[in-house]
Amino acid sequence: MIKWLRLQIDQFGLKLHSNDSGKGRARKRVGILRLDGMGDLILFLDALKGYRSFYPREKFEIYLIVEEWALPILKGIGDLDFVIPLDTRKFRKNPFYRWMKLREIREFEFDIFINGCIFRELLYGDILTYASASILRYGFLPQPDQKEERIYGNKCYTHLFPDPKWSVHELERNARLLREIGYRDFVVGMPTIKRYAGDLKENRTSFIVVPGARFKVRRWPIDRFAEIANRIYRRTGLIPTITGSASEQVLSEELINRAPELPWNNQTGSSIESLPELLLSAQFILTNDTGIMHYGMALGVRTAAMVYGGLFTSYSKYPVHLQKEILVIHDLKTDCFDCLGHCIYSNEKDKIKPCLDHVTVDQVFQAIEKWLPEKYSGEPSNPLAS
């Protein structure tokens, strides 16, 4: 009821602001909403190329509405014309900021508006789509349990399409929306961030370890990260570099304490702006975070991800023709995968899921062994190598 009332208030206010639908403009305006996490946004980049092809620059301007933190990722992306940042936390809690952003979207006078977010949210994507007042407003149908989005939010759109969420990889989900809109023969490819193409360092003497994940149930045990790092260092002399969000500093310190003899380079809390350079300086990445997995892949850095089965198809199971320098390491027993976290074997809160717990150090080491270089000549001797 509160969400419905908030929607009614927002819609009433927006009706007081007219929209001339861009009369007299040389190019039409296309707004695309992507209020996603880092991984989802990176997986969208190939579809963005498709939108640019379908809406050519000589006839259309493409505006991308994203979270403010995403601006560094989009810097230099040539497939769009403008980026509109939005802070969803403030949008939810600050009435003045919320109204300012709704009015801003209305005043852009979009001709076409597309909500491509993986989740339909009445008070985010739905109201922002309504605010655009576009002649054409596209999105996915909500999931069956999203009653308010179905009853009230669907009216914010002119065209809604079935959502294959969870049954296909997010790359293919993005492609399906584009095909529904009209680009019928679009074929999804691997997202790439071209401005860093060829930036892999020649003399890469490190490897990246990312032990954090948003939810504890998706974190591979820290002692196993320590053991695999130890094995790699003994074999190659490569320096283990840790990264992650500032909130994961405690986790990084625990990892260092598990293997204090290693020459750790702790870069936890590095800014998003500096993350590409850090990743590109490494031979490869070890992570259980799908966001970093997708980012490394887009940069062209070899990436190995230890993943749980709950969202396997939608985030970890890349289409076969796109599997290049990425290793997805998982439990060999997959019949219970895609449970969306509703584990039939263990639902203990904040405890690693059995399918991820079954991934062993030996399994990971054997998978990445082909990437390991010979120990660098000319480097100081490694006291652990004997």
Image: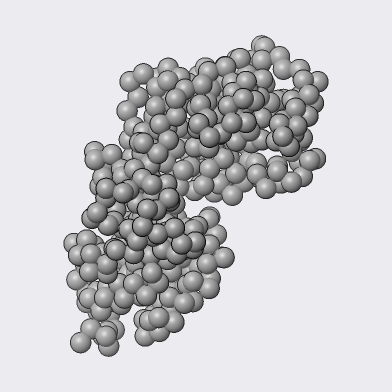
Residue that protrudes farthest toward the top in the picture: 24
Residue drawn at 61 percent across, 14 percent down: 135
Residue drawn at 38 percent across, 50 percent down: 310
Residue 141 in percent (x, y) is at: 51, 26
Q: Quadrant of residue 66?
A: top right
Residue 83 in percent (x, y) is at: 59, 36
* Along the line of sight, the residue nearer the viewer: 101 or 91: 91
Residue 36 in percent (x, y) is at: 53, 43
Whether residue 13 is situated above or below residue 336 in the rendered picture: above
Q: Indicate the quadrant containing the N terminus: top left, top right, bottom left or bottom right.
A: top right
Q: Quadrant of residue 382?
A: bottom left
Whether residue 341 is situated above or below residue 244 in the rendered picture: above
Whether residue 246 is situated above or below residue 134 in the rendered picture: below
Q: Indicate the quadrant containing the C terminus: top left, top right, bottom left or bottom right.
A: bottom left
Residue 294 in percent (x, y) is at: 39, 49
Residue 60 in view, yes or no? no
Residue drawn at 78 percent across, 29 percent down: 9
In the visual, does 212 lie left or right of 282?
Answer: right
* Along the line of sight, the residue nearer the viewer: 115 or 296: 115
In the visual, does 137 lie left or right of 42?
Answer: right
**Image colouring:** one colour
In the visual, does 261 lie left or right of 368?
Answer: right
Residue drawn at 27 percent across, 57 percent down: 331
